[in-house]
Amino acid sequence: MSNRSILDEIGADVVLFNGKVVTVDEDDSIFEAVAIKDGRILKAGSNEEVQSLASSRARQIDLKGRTVLPGFIDSHEHCIRRGLQADYVDCRSPPVMTINDIVEALKAKAGEKKEGEWVVGSWFDETKLGDRRWPNRYDLDKASSKHPIYLGRAGGHNAVANSLALSIAGISKDTPQPSGGRIEKDEQGEPTGRLDEIAAMNMVRGKIPSPGPEESTEIMVEKWPEVEEMLLSWGITTMHEAHIKAPASLAYQELLKKGGLRMRVGLMLDGMTPYGGYATDDLARQGIRTGFGWGDKLYVVGVKIGVDGAMGSLTAALTEPYSNDPENYGIVRVTQEDLTEETVRCHKAHLRTCIHAIGDRAIDIALNSVEEAVKSMEWKDHRHRIEHAGYVRPDQLDRMKRLGVAVSASIGFCHPIGDSHYDALGTDRLRGYYPMRSFKEHGIVAGGNSDGFGRNWALTGIYGCATRRSSGGRYLAKEEAISVMDSIRAYTINAAFLEGTEDEKGSIEPGKMADFVVLDRDILTVDPEEILQTKVLMTMVGGEVVYEAD
Ligand SMILES: [Zn+2]
């Protein structure tokens, strides 16, 4: 057998050459080319080195000088349920800029429906509206008094209902406050329509007819290609689905089975505190642990549990009150006892917890529970996660490091909604806002996420890491900015660490999965302001091209 025919047997089946291959390895190595065999990386090196490994049938991709990075790993999003929201009125700003815009959009949707049918809006953000106030029931009544209306706020922790929806839900002056939630009432005690936290929101949301579990699964399977195409066009090759229940999990399994899953998805299972989920006890009994999966495209990252609300809606739990609401310390949705019990239960079952904690008071509660878990049984490499970590005090950094906690930081918020966070925290606390530099300096591994906010999540998050600049042009503690290379790490190798796959992906090194993104410019050398305009030209998962820009 000649060398050539041996190479045809065992050589690379895809070659990317003539580019700038940013490996994100420990030495920040950069090469011209990379060879792939059976979905894995054979070698990154010079054009010559790599071409010498190619079989004669290898697909040759000329990068024409473009930059290649490891595929982005976004460590906290809620994607598959978007399929169920196709009928929702999108009230995102921009383009929606006033309460009147919201009313008009809801009115138009009501016009398409029979009287009595629900109208659901989503994604409004009062901090972006010209009115600078929350819409209330009376605003929504102007959209329709004959259709019940439920309007969800961005972030998923608050909503507003119109008068008909409140009355269907039986919410009146006399309704007691649900535990862990709040029905806002005016000075006369009348509900204003605003509902804070799931406990209050569900009183109304529970009345909206929704497809049963089987139909939900079908709809999510059907709509997934659109959602996935969006993610792939943003260069995201792995995404952590931050909370699933049976219909979503079944939809993913169905997609996997029929070859309809092009990207990789890590699942956070439905924890018991405070979500009332059912996962943990059973999983523990059945020995299902973190990492359990259906191959390298669908697997369990951990169990989602949580402590507080969100910063933009002033429900994240702080030890000092909000700068723009001096009586308000935010909301805690769990007792320390319950959270600790759940965390210990997960820990003993070798299930990583992914604990939603945004404010520093919530982070204290989360760390207290991890502290107890760590004491309860030795599991050195648990990597229990804090999800978000929106305001971290300096003393908490040391404690995170000591406990071996990793962070899925929502630094992707910085650009799209950083202004509302700036106002919420005030200037004195900005240093602790998703403190990426401090995480790095303390040896805490932090990945990035956008939790659904904004667009082009990974690149917007990388921009946030590197510039700390909001869309309003304010800086949220420039001192906490990190280099562009480290910003890329937050969306590649660090995020791989958060799911325990740093030996399998997150950098371009031999043996790792061939997940790549090709960009239209070199974000390591352009003005960081340009990162926001950067476009993805091509995305590869396991050596296959899954997205190409037109
Ligand atoms: Zn989330």
Image (spheres, helix red, strand yellow):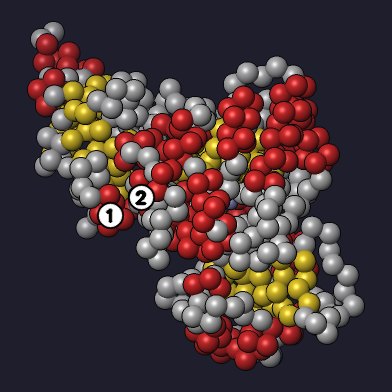
Which quadrant holds the C terminus?
A: bottom left
The percent position of residue 148, horizontal first and vertical second, equals 69, 82
Which one is in front, 448 or 396?
A: 396
Report whether the residue tagged 2 is closer than 8 Å to ligand 1.
Answer: no
Secondary structure at badge 2 equals helix
Which one is in front, 528 or 85?
A: 528
Q: How many marks?
A: 2
Q: Amino acid at mark 1?
A: Glu
Which quadrant holds the N terminus?
A: top left
Secondary structure at badge 1 equals helix
Report whether the residue tagged 1 is closer than 8 Å to ligand 1.
Answer: no
**Mark 2 surroundings within 10 Å by alpha-carbon count, few (fewer than 14), some (14 through 19), many (20 or more):** many
Q: Residue at x 11, y 42 (%)?
A: 64
For residue 175, above or below residue 459: below
Q: Residue at x 71, y 24 (%)?
A: 374
Q: Are marks 2 and 1 in contact (CB under 8 Å)?
A: yes
Q: Is residue 77 left or right of residue 543?
A: right
The residue that disc 1 covers is: 529
The residue that disc 2 covers is: 467
Q: CA distance from mark 2 to mark 1?
A: 8 Å
Q: To which quarter of the image does residue 522 belong?
A: top left
